[in-house]
Every structure is written in C-alpha cells, then in structure tokens.
Image (tube, rainbow, N blue to C red):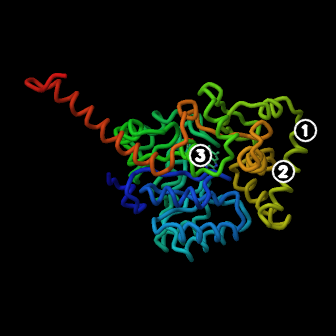
Amino acid sequence: MQTPLTELLGCRYPIIQTAMGWVADPALVAATGEAGGFGFLAGAVMTLEEIEAGILEIKARTDAPFGVNFHMYVPFAEDIVDLCIKHRVRAVSYSRSPSAQSVAKLKAAGIVCIPTVGAFKHAVKAVELGADALVVQGGEGGGHTGSVATSILLAQVCGAVSVPVAAAGGFRDGAGLVAALAMGAQGIAMGTRFLLTEESPVPGVTKSVYLDTPPESIVVSSRLDGLPQRMIANGYLASLMQASQVGLLIRALRNGLAFTRMTGASLWAMLGSAWRMRRSGDLSLGQTLMAANAPMMIQEAMVRGHPEQGILPSGQVAGLIDDLPTVATLIADIMSEAEATLERLASHRASEQPGGQTE
Ligand SMILES: Cc1cc2nc3c(=O)[nH]c(=O)nc-3n(C[C@H](O)[C@H](O)[C@H](O)COP(=O)(O)O)c2cc1C
C-alpha cells in the first residue's frame, strides 16, 4: 500500500512507530523497518554518544530506512542534527521545532522533517517552518498530548496543509488505518501499540499493567511537568496530585540534576537550555523547571520495572489491547485487516447498487 507518506519515508507500509522515551530502542526500530513500517529512535532521552551508537546498531540490524527523534532544548541539539546528517538518517521527528537554520540544514541534506503536532495552530506553524510531513496526534494519544480528539484534529489539519499527514492517537489495527486514510491522512503513527509488542524493551510486569488497564483509567494530567500528558492513573500519579508546591519544586530540582547527569551535559549547558526554553515563550517558568520530571519519572516504570513507583505514559488505546505480538505479526495483521476492511466496504457498496449482489 503506497501513499505519499511511504514514498517520502521509503517504507513499504504507511505505518510509523513513533519515538517513546526508554521504549523505542534500536531493536524496536529495526524490527519495525524490517517488517515494512518506519521506526523512530527515541533520542530525546539519550546522550549524543548513545544516539550515535543507536543509529549504528539499527544500521547493523537492518537496511531499512529509519528516523531519530530529538528534543530541541537539549544543549547538544545542533550536534544531533549533524549526527543525523553524518549517518544519512532518513527522517527526524521533534515536537518543538529546532531553529530555522537547523531545519534548513536537515532539508538541504535530504533528511525528511516530520514533527508531531497536537493542535491546529502548531500544524500550520510547523509547515511554515519547513516540515515535509506531519504526525498529527489527537488527545487520545499517549505522552504529551493536546485537548482535541484525533477525528476533529485530523479534519482541521488535513483540510489546511498540503504535506502528507500521519494520523496518531488511538490507532492499533487495520480498520483504524482505513479510517485514517478515509479522513485524509496518508498513514498512521502509533506509540502505545508498539510499546505492547514482544520486541519492546519494557519489563513484562509493566506491560501487564498496560494490558489490564481500561480506557477510562488512562487520564490526562499536567501534574508531572506542567504540560498535559496522558498516562495510566496509578498510585504514583495520585501522590503527585497530593504533593504540595514545595514538594513538587524539590522533586523537579532533583530530577533536573539527575537528567543533567544522565545526558552528560554540564550544569551550565543545562541552565542555558532552560533559559532558551523560557525565552522562546513556549513554556512558563514552572514548566521550564519541571521539564526533566517526565523523562526521569518514566524511567522507573519503563526501565526498572516498578510500575507503581513511576509514570506510565499511555494512549487510551491501551484499553483495547490485550496481546503482545511480534512487530512483524502486528504490521502484517494491520495490513491484511486493512485489505479485508476495504473489501468489506466495497462489497457493502456493491450490494447497495441496483442489480448488485446481496449478502
Ligand atoms: C511511553 C511513551 C513515551 C513517549 N515518549 C515520547 C518521546 O520521547 N518523544 C515524543 O515525541 N513522543 C513521545 N511519546 C508520544 C508517542 O510518540 C506518540 O505520539 C503517541 O504515543 C501516539 O499515540 P498512541 O499512543 O495512541 O499511539 C510517548 C508516548 C508513550 C506512550
């Protein structure tokens, strides 16, 4: 199934595995590429050295094209851009646009720029800044998310931009892919569905919590870092809701220092990033201070296997998922379900024509 999105990304199927901190590792990205989808490495929680090692590992595992996700506010964002160019990565994704010069540099090197947007105005701005395609994520989606549902946001964005769009937020199967195509998208992008696969590195005990959670227990809260984030309601989130402002500040400073150590950046470089973040006007002072909370608190559940002591970012779609297929099976099933869905719709139409077959 070829669409303008598959042509741009060089993959067989219009299915993107989005970046997820601590989850979208080289094995998951390579498995996605091998199966015909397009995977993004979660570079936003990695050091520069880890990103380079990740790129090399993916290349050793597969010849399929893939992308790298990064955060423009890390002190070494410009170095990540150079790294992607050096290793001829096919695409980059980001949620806040890097500088106009970086976007121009990436595009001049032939790298596809495909940011994720969660609001109509961000979609328009991202295209103005040079995006080649968009991942349009509705409020059902996991991690940081907007307030407008996928169906509404897609209608807004697809009617206004001329670049290819991948629909995100709530997708898991072939019927969803057909629905997204019908609404004007050129493919789907999924996070939670790929988190719940055999190759995903998330510990089994944490995956079980995702599988057992109903959609209504996957909620949005800004308590983690001041920005709306969709996650599973657990004891840790309840403790964040009850914490005092001083308690939250102490937690934020502790996580800020831990994040600085983890990324290997100097304290001055991190303070410089915080200053740029604040000055850009994108984030309030409180949000800037809490920016390191999410990556540090997610690690506890996703890496250390303590789902009750950390944050579990999740799309509401986890409430509909009850299996852990391999990535190859997942992608093959989505494509055959999509074909079956199209045939079913065509046969309904045929049966409605005068003289058409009846069921
Ligand atoms: C565990 C988890 C971690 C995530 N981490 C990131 C990240 O590091 N960078 C990013 O751009 N988006 C991140 N996201 C958002 C996803 O890339 C994706 O946009 C979202 O999951 C799509 O919605 P879905 O879960 O309904 O498929 C994360 C989502 C989840 C569930």
Query: Alpha-carbon distance for marks 3 and 1?
Result: 31 Å
Q: Nearer the viewer, residue 35 or 96?
A: 35
**Circles 2 and 1: CB atoms closer than 8 Å:** no
Instruction: Identify residue for label 1.
Output: 247
Residue 315 location, x and y as percent?
59, 37
Q: Residue at x 77, y 42 (%)?
A: 306
Q: Residues within 10 Å of mark 3 (few under 14, many from 20)?
A: many
Q: Residue at x 51, y 61 (%)?
A: 113
Element assignment for label 1 = helix
User: For disc 3, does the CB lie below 8 Å from ligand 1?
Assistant: yes
Q: Residue at x 49, y 61 (%)?
A: 130
- Disc marking residue 280: none
Q: Residues within 10 Å of mark 2 (few under 14, many from 20)?
A: many
Q: Of the residues shown, which amino acid type is indicated by label 3?
A: Leu
* Front label number (3 vs 1): 3
Q: Residues within 10 Å of mark 1 (few under 14, many from 20)?
A: few
155, above or below 86, in the image: above
- Quadrant of the image containing the C terminus: top left
145, above or below 47, in the image: above
Q: Of the residues shown, which amino acid type is indicated by label 1?
A: Gly
Q: Residue at x 34, y 38 (%)?
A: 182
Instruction: Identify residue for label 2.
Output: 255
Q: Residue furthest bottom?
A: 86
Q: Nearer the viewer, residue 72 or 338?
A: 338
Q: Please indicate, yes or no, whether residue 284 appears anywhere in the rendered image.
A: no
Element assignment for label 2 = helix
Q: Of the residues shown, which amino acid type is indicated by label 2?
A: Asn
Q: Answer left or right for 212 relative to 151.
A: right
Residue 92 location, x and y as percent?
54, 62
Instruction: Identify residue for label 3.
Output: 195
